Image: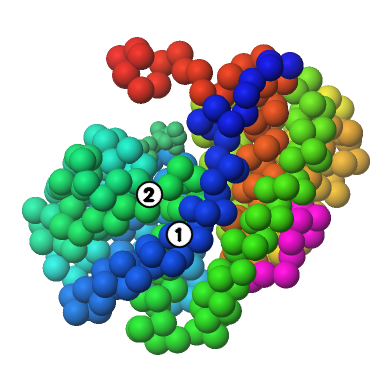
């Protein structure tokens, strides 16, 4: 196992997670309220998120809130998809939210430029309020000032979605999400301490696997993509793929066999039974199964908050998976301009 000083590894964001979440809620949310007021003034009737990688997965989860609890149309685009297939409706009543931690991802910045030119209300969500191309391109900017991008991006998209939906017509679930959100800092603080050892053990086991299928459903599917594709491929250099438990019977079923490894992410939402059915099937044929079950961590909050909670044990899991494979998760071969793409 690689001997690293974990406080110096950029990938691992557990150290300041709680203070960043608190700060976002206390100082960031009031700033988002101003943007939400502008959305009301502009009578926004459609929302597009544009992002890439981990931020896109957070936006896809935020979009689910709009779909589930409102009749406000919302889509989450990858930057190049937005540029190549720019949506027809892009006007003063449309809002385009570009999310990029660096604020430099070219396809997100260019999408915001186009949206602004077409008269849409634009918001750039990025780490720093100034100094990036995204901050310069968007009409409105929100700088969250934290490193823990999954929690930051998810909370920002959730807060905008919940508040705006509430102003457009309440749904009792939205209030419960907003209320439970306030409990997150204490719960995360506990998880940052309590989940490390168990995740480390699981990662030791998984480090013998040369590839991993990651399976989830419903609101945990974007988290599965973030972890089972972006994190696992980019940061741990482990081969793998992500599968939707709802689709498992239609294709993936046939490769289940002894020695084929799976990581399941299991939540408390309505699709829990769908993933459980898959787990039950898979366990008949292979012992190489790891389940991250919300019930083992904290199941007291609204299930739409499960992706924020399960992120903590998963973050440790992939950190230790990487160093167990003697790979520093901060190392890159190609990304970030090392090789032209
Ligand atoms: O948030 P940014 O700066 O736009 O960067 C997006 C990048 O972040 C990651 O999600 C993590 O490095 C990458 O997959 C993606 O390329």
Q: Secondary structure at mark 1?
A: helix
Location of mark 1 (residue) = 23
In which quadrant will I find the C terminus? Answer: top left
Say how the picture is coloured. Answer: rainbow
- Please state which of residues 255 and 332 is positioned toward the viewer in this rendering: 332
Task: Tell me what residue is drawn at x 22 percent, y 46 percent.
Answer: 130
Task: Tell me what residue is drawn at x 32 percent, y 18 percent.
Answer: 337
Location of mark 2 (residue) = 145
Please say whether residue 300 is one of the residues in the magenta stretch.
yes
Is residue 251 shown above or below 188?
above
Residues under numbered marks 2 and 1 in contact, where contact means CB atoms less than 8 Å apart: yes
The answer to whether residue 272 is seen in the rendering is: no
Badge 2 or badge 1: first in the primary sequence? 1
Coordinates of residue 286 in the picture (x, y in percent): 87, 33
Please say whether residue 92 is one of the residues in the magenta stretch.
no
The answer to whether residue 151 is seen in the rendering is: yes
Q: Secondary structure at mark 2?
A: loop
Ligand 1 within 8 Å of disc 1? The answer is: no
- Please state which of residues 280 and 1 is positioned toward the viewer in this rendering: 1
């Amino acid at each position: 196992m690689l001997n690293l000083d974990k406080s110096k590894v950029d990938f691992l964001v557990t150290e300041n997670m709680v203070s960043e979440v608190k700060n976002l809620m206390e100082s960031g949310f009031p700033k988002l309220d101003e943007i939400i007021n502008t959305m009301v003034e502009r009578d926004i009737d459609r929302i597009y998120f544009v992002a890439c990688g981990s931020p896109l997965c957070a936006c896809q989860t935020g979009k689910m809130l709009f779909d589930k609890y409102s009749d406000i149309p919302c889509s989450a685009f990858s930057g190049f998809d937005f540029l190549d297939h720019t949506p027809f409706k892009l006007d003063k009543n449309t809002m385009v939210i570009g999310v990029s931690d660096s604020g430099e991802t070219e396809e997100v910045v260019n999408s915001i430029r186009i949206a602004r030119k077409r008269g849409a209300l634009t918001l750039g969500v990025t780490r720093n309020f100034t100094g990036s191309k995204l901050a310069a391109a968007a009409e409105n900017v929100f700088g969250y000032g934290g490193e823990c991008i999954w929690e930051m991006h998810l909370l920002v998209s959730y807060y905008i979605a919940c508040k705006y939906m509430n102003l457009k017509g309440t749904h009792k679930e939205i209030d419960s999400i907003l209320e439970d959100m306030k409990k997150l800092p204490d719960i995360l603080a506990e998880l940052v301490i309590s989940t490390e050892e168990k995740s480390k053990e699981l990662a030791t086991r998984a480090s013998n696997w040369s590839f991993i299928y990651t399976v989830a459903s419903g609101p945990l599917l974007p988290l599965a993509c973030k972890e089972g594709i972006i994190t696992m491929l980019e940061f741990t250099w482990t081969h793998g793929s992500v599968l939707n438990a709802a689709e498992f019977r239609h294709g993936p079923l046939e490769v289940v066999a002894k020695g084929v490894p799976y990581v399941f992410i299991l939540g408390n939402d309505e699709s829990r039974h769908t993933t459980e059915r898959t787990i039950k099937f898979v366990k008949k044929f292979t012992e190489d199964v790891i389940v991250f079950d919300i019930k083992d961590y904290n199941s007291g909050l609204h299930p739409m908050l499960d992706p924020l909670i399960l992120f903590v044990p998963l973050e440790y899991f992939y950190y230790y998976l990487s160093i167990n494979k003697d790979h520093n998760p901060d190392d890159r071969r190609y990304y970030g301009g090392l090789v032209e793409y």
